[in-house]
Image: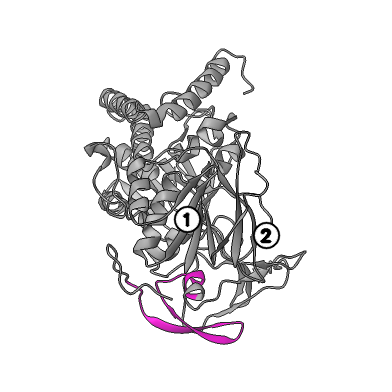
Amino acid sequence: MIREVEILVAGGGPAGLCAAAAAASLGAKVLLCERSDVPGGQLVKQTHKFFGSEKQYAGDRGIHIGRTLADAAVNHPNIEILTDAAVLGIYEDGVVTVLYKNQHLKIRPKRTIVATGAAEKFLAFPNNDLPGIYGAGAVQTLMNVHGVKPAERVLMVGAGNIGLIVSYQLLQAGVEVAGVIEAAPRIGGYLVHASKLRRAGVPIRTGYTIKEAYGNGKLEGAVICRLDENWKPVPGTEEDIRCDTICLAVGLTPLAELCWQAGCQMAFIRELSGHVPVVDGNLETSIPGLYAAGDISGIEEASAAMVEGRLAGYAAAGSLGYEPQKAGELRQGAAEELAELRSGPAGARIMAGLEKAAALLAARKGGAGPC
Amino acid sequence: MRIEQHPILEFDRGEKVVFFFNGQPVDGYTSETIAAALHAAGIRELGHSPELHRPRGLFCAIGNCSSCFMTVDGQPNVRVCVTKVKAGMRVEEQAGKGVVSLD
């Protein structure tokens, strides 16, 4: 039996929850599928306070924001949430298949919003497969969701916001942080996060990379070395760091498999951190009625994912005839909020990526694109 | 080891139960994933790579990367990082690529 649905949202993180709430607020009926057993996405382990403005819950901790968003969606009469529900495929006849608690569901939505988020990137170095080499997010899950001490002594690779924030959270969990290394010549994350670490006595070394990991059956340490201005290792600068855990915080990459499989126009855009679906101002992909919101269309902070979710939710509901004028105004408001979020120096990279995507979109609309 | 004191968080671990790792009893809690409970018991090696037989642990802990596949109650290729502990559960290292029954 195929179930008919107005709007299907794939993914219950910040983008998906906000998309569902926005569409439901205009009267649309929404089914949200989340593959894990709780909604909230990766907010469930973010113990730090968020930046941005009040509209994006600045000053509140990620865990609380996740709970607020999830409660609002769970309690909304127009939203149904399925957990343990992984969206498997989007087919040409409009059917979407879902694995829900070991059952195979078939759903025919009028609109679909893909908000599947991102995954952690890996890094190539000898012995990078030793037990004890984890994604920084994995360590966050162990300690902040499950309350398990993830390590005794950690080497953090990457001084972007995730590397800095997780290092501080490791200290809060009673773990020693041997240091943070960053291949780039400067710290990528916010100074406020770096300063907290330095005050706690954790060295942050820029222009350093990991040369190799070592250990017999499990991680016992790492050799790090300096990089020159051409990112080449400088011989003779090797140092041995004893540690039982290495955290890789070397960026995220969009989880865009559903968009690939559905046949959306895709593009590799470095500034958006990988292959992304090319979307228009409504966050609609090249497939009519299929939207992409949040990290899937470019890696940003959760605050941007929330606003993108709202934007896609308003656009999808408006296109179904739910208060189209109000939907248009709200969509416009969300677009302005996004522009404001991206207006600072930290937004320059994402803006450059979005410009590339816009050029590809213009080529497509002009008939010159690949789709 | 489990975190007993945390400046921000309190942990609702659920009920304490015993499950089995390669036949040995291990304490776990019903709100924990198998990977978290094993990690708390100091077990980080979850398997070996199918071809070179190198030791493997978890990587992503959110059910995405498939580094943590194990055999649970006879079923292979279970992502233990997103599968909750149950009393009496039998968690075993799997040999090579697990063969899934199509019955």
In the rendered image, residue A257, in percent from the top left (x then y), is placed at: 58, 43
In the rendered image, residue A149, in percent from the top left (x then y), is placed at: 42, 70
The furthest residue to the front: A236
Q: Seen in the image, is A224 located left or right of residue B10?
A: right
Q: Tell me the kind of residue under disc 1.
A: Gly
Tell me if residue B19 is in the magenta stretch: yes
Which residues make up the magenta segment? B12-37
Q: Nearer the viewer, residue A239 or A6?
A: A239
Tell me if residue A53 is in the magenta stretch: no
In the rendered image, residue A102, in percent from the top left (x then y), is placed at: 53, 63
Which disc number belongs to residue A3?
none
Q: Tell me the kind of residue under disc 2.
A: Asn
The residue lying at 50 percent from left, 72 percent from top is B39
Which disc number belongs to residue A127?
2
Say which element carries label 2: loop
Q: Nearer the viewer, residue A170 or A357?
A: A170
Q: Nearer the viewer, residue A147 or A105?
A: A147
Say which element carries label 1: strand
- Classify A241 as above or below B95: above
Mark 1 highlights which residue? A179
- Few, some or many C-alpha atoms within 10 Å of disc 1 (few <14, some 14-19, many ≥20)? some
Chain of the residue that carries numbered disc 1 in the rendered image: A
Q: Give the CA separation, mark 1 to mark 2.
A: 20 Å
Instruction: Specify whether residue A226 is in view.
Output: yes
Q: Earlier in the sequence, mark 1 or mark 2?
A: 2
From the viewer's perspective, is the residue at label 1 or at label 2 nearer? Answer: 1
- Classify A100 as above or below A347: below
Q: Nearer the viewer, residue A322 or A329?
A: A329
Chain of the residue that carries numbered disc 2 in the rendered image: A
In the rendered image, residue A307, in percent from the top left (x then y), is placed at: 34, 35
* Residue A341, quarter of picture: top left
